[in-house]
Amino acid sequence: MYSSSYARSSTFLYLILAVLIAKASFCFSAKVYVVYMGSITDQDSDDIVKENHQILASLHSGSIEQAQASHIYSYRHGFRGFAAKLTDEQVSQVSNMPGVVSVFPNSIRKLHTTRSWDFLGLANNNEAAEVVGHSIKNQTNIIVGILDTGFWPESPSFRDTDMPPVPPGWKGQCQIGEAFNASSCNRKVIGARYYAGGYEAEKGSDEDVSYKSPRDSLGHGSHTASTAAGRYVENMNYNGLAAGGGRGGAPLARIAVYKACWKSGCYDADLLAAFDDAIRDGVHIISLSVGGESPQADYFQDAISLGSFHAARNGVLVVASAGNEGNPSSATNLAPWIVTVAASAIDRDFTSDIILGNGVNITGESLSPLGLNASTRIISAADAFSGDFTPYQSSYCLDSSLNATKTKDVVLVCRHAEKSTKSKLEKSKIVQKAGGVGMILIDETKTGIAVPFVIPSAIVANIRGEQILSYIKSTRNPVSRIFGAKTVLGTQPAPRAATFSSKGPNTLTPEILKPDISAPGLNILAAWSPVAAAGNPKFSVISGTSMACPHISGIAALVKAVHPSWSPSAIKSAIMTTATILDNHQEPIKADPDGAIANAFDYGSGFVNPTRALDPGLIYDSQPEDFVAFLCSLGYDKKSLRLVTRDNSTCDGAFKTPSDLNYPSIAVPNLKDKFSVTRVVTNVGEATSTYEVAVVPPAGVNVTVVPNRLVFTTIGQKIKFTVKFKVAAPSNGYSFGLLSWKNGKRQVNSPLAVRVAPPSFGSFR
Ligand SMILES: *[C@@H]1O[C@H](CO)[C@@H](O)[C@H](O)[C@H]1NC(C)=O
Ligand SMILES: *[C@@H]1O[C@H](CO)[C@@H](O)[C@H](O)[C@H]1NC(C)=O
Ligand SMILES: *[C@@H]1O[C@H](CO)[C@@H](O)[C@H](O)[C@H]1NC(C)=O
Ligand SMILES: *[C@@H]1O[C@H](CO)[C@@H](O)[C@H](O)[C@H]1NC(C)=O
Ligand SMILES: *[C@@H]1O[C@H](CO)[C@@H](O)[C@H](O)[C@H]1NC(C)=O
Ligand SMILES: *[C@@H]1O[C@H](CO)[C@@H](O)[C@H](O)[C@H]1NC(C)=O
């Protein structure tokens, strides 16, 4: 019998008692906390559970019943700790117990809500196709763990036709549950589990926990899993749009599903339980399209930082999304042992033509196939205000703000504000309810995200919206016709940094440049959960860094397939140093919505290039002990570090600053006069090769690299170099540059992000 049955039966027990606790909760107001206790030693995992119950009993004056009732999870495979309901007083007691590193509340995380592979240069139509010069056959031995909302087992993206038997050494399981039995897993999805303890403890059993099993009721997890490693599907489309064959990044790799996210999000207690199992089960890559709100909590208080730290120590690469907040300094999942993924637009748009009565043809965006059959009267929603609403309010098409007498059978021009509580889709429903037959939505958020409207509709930018409104004013009988959406390829330069993608600098450790890499994340087609949308679609087009993340997870699986012995850091380095910062017009990548030149805070090292990532030439490697030295350099105390690592780690000053971590990019957040950074590259290309440096210095900074030539004679050889930064001119904010090692055949790139410290007494003279 699988050993976590104890944890599950305790969870079950908890459920029965939850009702009683909920009734009594005002007396002692217990909340769910995660108690984190560092690495596991060679202790038996059942003993860990017993010890956790002893700790809990001691907090409950020896009561075993109360201890069991408060226990939610024990973490005992990848790391130690537990989740439990605790009062404030119990929190302070347990915080001071030996072995406890940190205690933090059970926060909720949000989901960071196919053409894309053609665009990335991988053959889209043949899942067995090899990449020139590399065999990727070994991907059937690579296991990608997806921590998300589960998956839809009947989706063609998850079929196991012609897949070889499950790789030996796989320790995961297929956890049966609601609408999910043993045959729901197969040789493609080789394991699936679900985690609801933390969610139910917060939400109570009333909250809709649909499918108490790994089955996905929301679509997000099916989408991310199929993007990373879905099988080739011949005719994928959404409402007839984006039609064609589609596949995941590593279509023959195995998927292991860990459902830790539910309708309103993913709780820390559940995410950590999923990490704990995934590490033990033997996944190679964890893909996590989930994150907290910025600013991110300290590394020892953040479940994703901790779970991924232990994954990295166990040789598992964690790939996570940067977030969808879009502003400077909003990137999350900032730990240097995570690959943090930003989102880009690709060269595909879903457009909807709007023809005005004066013949003007305006291109809008939509995912709706619906169109108007004839030119139809068009009015501004501001002119259709109802009752107590002002024209300003009705111009946003707020619920009940529209006068149905005026809106019947017309096309309405509505606005959409940045902070709108209604989605764009919901606005089309409001207009429909008011009797409108079409909608043009002026998008003040400018995200470029296409929407499957319920009536003929199109999104236009501000400037086009004003054009339409002035046409309406200019004539007595304004009309327009909206055409159904169509797929348009190659219209604009691509990739472009997506408006919503969260950006650097890194607010927690500015010496580590974040995000790390960019991948397609705007209007991505992949598998869906048929119960999650009207019309039961098998596929859907959605946007977010959530969609960018699994593109990188799939590519990481290919790199791992070609180079099975590489460390997580080496795989990450290969993906980062081979990325491009040029678009398909060979010009610097631009950022939506205004076309400004993008920089490393938008896309990290650049837009991913999967073919080049298989053959990076040089890598910037790091070992788990380097991450400990990194934490030491941040001032974490030795006592808690030793608990985290459970070994004789000392903070012996191996790293003087976090800049000493051998990271594949370089950020210098506060350059006063001079600063040097050392890096070590390992030769993974030809045994004999010589690289020369090329530097594009950031504005106002002089950069010297010593030595400027690296001569390798063996594979695996490591050479150290120093990058010296010197202030040349005062400057404002960050400026960006590039350091490249070139050998004629390859170019190994690292972005440079440098901020010159503001002048103070004694510096500039
Ligand atoms: C359960 O297994 C049977 C075959 O044994 C299968 O026909 C059925 O569809 C499965 N049910 C679910 C919900 O997957
Ligand atoms: C509107 O313009 C676009 C781009 O110029 C063109 O492709 C499209 O056919 C035009 N639509 C109509 C209905 O004329
Ligand atoms: C347009 O015409 C098609 C086919 O004649 C019809 O199915 C559809 O309902 C019409 N749409 C509208 C908005 O009238
Ligand atoms: C709606 O518009 C009609 C026609 O202009 C008007 O008579 C009526 O009073 C309006 N109703 C409200 C609730 O504003
Ligand atoms: C730590 O050091 C002590 C004393 O040198 C040694 O006995 C112990 O085995 C070491 N522990 C580990 C985990 O290396
Ligand atoms: C920076 O480099 C330029 C060009 O090599 C040189 O002329 C200048 O003196 C340098 N500035 C500093 C402050 O070292």
Image (spheres, rainbow, N blue to C red):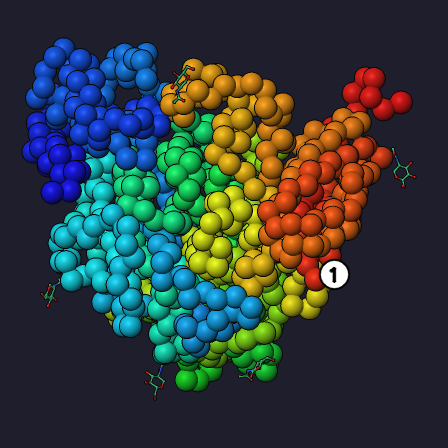
Label 1 SS: loop
Identity of the residue drawn at 48% across and 59% down: 562
In the picture, measured across the screen, residue 58 lies left or right of residue 742, that is: left
Q: In this view, does 489 lie above or below 642?
A: below
Q: Give the image location of residue 78, x and y in percent.
A: 32, 35
Q: Is residue 59 above or below residue 480?
A: above
- In the image, what residue type sits under mark 1? Gly
Residue receiving disc 1:
744
Asked whether residue 121 is in view, the answer is no
Q: In which quarter of the image is residue 672?
A: top right
> Considering depth in this image, is 439 or 11 the residue closer to the camera?
11
Mark 1 packing: few (<14 Cα in 10 Å), some, or many (20+)?
Answer: few
> What residue is rendered at 37% in x and 65% in y?
252
Q: How many labels does the image show?
A: 1
Is 330 left or right of 737, judged from the image as shown?
A: left
Q: Identify the residue shown where x is 68% and y is 41%.
A: 719
For the N terminus, the quadrant is top left
Residue 660 is situated, as x and y percent measured from the top left of the image, at 62, 31
Q: State the image coordinates of residue 33 (x, y, percent, origin top left).
A: 28, 26
